[in-house]
Amino acid sequence: MATYARETRVLAPLDEVWSFHSTVDGLDALTPGFMNLEIREVTGPDGEADPEVLETGAEIDLAMRPFGVGPRQEWTSVITERTEPDDRAMFRDVMEGGPFPTWEHTHRFLADGEATVVADRVEYELPGGAVGRAASPLGWVGFEPMFRDRHRKTKALLE
C-alpha cells in the first residue's frame, strides 16, 4: 500500500485547529474548489443527521468531480477513530465506498507552544487492480496539490 504525508505548522492554538477540523464545515472549507465537492449527507454515530462534531462512527456521504471531468465520484467516509489527549489530537477516516480500493486518512494535531502542527497521512491504493497497485506510489502527483491547498487554507483561515 502506498502512503502520502504532509505536515504544516499553524500559528493557532490546538483547541481552535482541532475544533475546526472536527466538523463537516471544516472539510468543506478545506476541499479545493477543483474537486467540486458535494456533501450529500452526514450521519452521527447514533444516526442523528448533521452532527456538530464528527465523532467516531460518523459517516459522510459525498461526491466529487475533480476538475469537472468525468462522472461524479461517490464517496462514503467513516470516522473510525478519534482521540484527544492533553497536547495532541487525532482522527482517522476510512473510505467505505468510493473510487479507491483502499483509503485511510489519519489527521494528527500536536500542540507546539502557541502553534499547532497539522499532519496528514493517507494510506491508499489506486483503482485499476494490479496496474493501479503498481502505479499507487505515483499517487502523490495528484494528492500534493490538494493537500498543499488544504494546508495553505488552514493557515489562512486560522492564523
Image: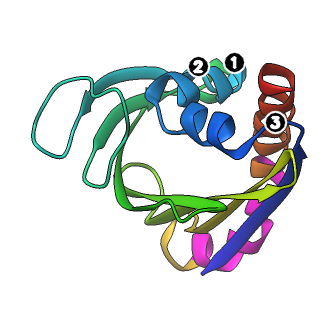
The location of residue 157, given as percent across then percent down, is 78, 20
Looking at the rendered structure, the kind of residue marked 3 is: Ala
Other-residue count near label 2 (Cα within 10 Å), few / some / many at <14 / 14–19 / ≥20: some
State the extent of the magenta-drawn residues as a range: 131-142
Q: Earlier in the sequence, mark 1 or mark 3?
A: 3
Circle number at residue 12 = 3
The location of residue 6, given as percent across then percent down, is 82, 58
Are the residues at dot 1 and dot 3 in contact (C-beta closer than 8 Å)? no
Toward which corner of the image does residue 155 lie, by quadrant? top right
Query: Relative to residue 16, is residue 114 drawn left or right?
Result: right
Q: Earlier in the sequence, mark 2 or mark 3?
A: 3
Residue 72 showing in the rendered view: no
The secondary element bearing badge 3 is classed as loop
Circle number at residue 13 = none
- Distance from label 1 to label 3 (Cα)? 24 Å
Q: Is residue 86 magenta?
A: no
Looking at the rendered structure, the kind of residue marked 1 is: Gly
Circle number at residue 33 = 1
Q: Is residue 134 magenta?
A: yes
- Distance from label 1 to label 2 (Cα)? 6 Å
Toward which corner of the image does residue 21 lie, by quadrant? top right
